Image (cartoon, rainbow, N blue to C red):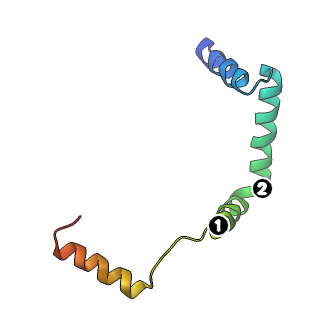
Amino acid sequence: MEEGEYARLQKAAQSEHLAVGEFVRRELRRSCAALDAGPADAKLRALNKALQHDFPSADISQMNEEIEAGYRLGLP
C-alpha cells in the first residue's frame, strides 16, 4: 500500500474512532456482504427505500402538458 493510501486509511479510521485494523476488517466484511447479496438485492433495497417516500406528483398527462408549456416559454 502506498504511503498516501495508508494516510487516507488512517484518517478514515480516526474519523470513526477505530483502529486501522478494525476499520479494515469492517470494510472488508461490508464488501464481502455486498458481493454475497448480489446486484439484484441492492437494487431491490434501493427501490424499497425509495418507495417509503411520499413526494407530490401529478398524472403523466398533466406533467407532459407542463413540460410542453415550459418548452413554449423557452425554458430548458
Residue 44 in the figure: left or right of residue 19: left
Q: Is residue 4 above or below residue 36?
A: above
As drawn, the label of residue 15 is none
Give x and y (percent) for residue 21: 82, 22
Residue drawn at the location 47% of the way across and 77% of the way down: 57
Residue 72 drawn at (x, y percent) = 17, 76
- Which percent across, then down, holds residue 58? 44, 81
Name the residue at 73% across, 62% down. Answer: 41
Mark 2 surroundings within 10 Å by alpha-carbon count, few (fewer than 14), some (14 through 19), many (20 or more): few
Q: CA distance from mark 1 to mark 2?
A: 15 Å
Residue drawn at (75%, 49%) of the image: 35
Q: 12 or 15: which is nearer to us? A: 15
Q: Is residue 48 above or below residue 26?
A: below
Is 4 rendered above or below residue 32?
Answer: above
Q: Amino acid at mark 2?
A: Ala
Residue ID for mark 1 = 47
Residue at position x 78%, y 56% in the image: 37
- Residue position marked by numbered label 2 in the rendering: 37
- Determine whether, in the image, residue 66 is placed left or right of residue 29: left
> Mark 1 or 2 closer to N-term?
2
Local SS, label 2: helix
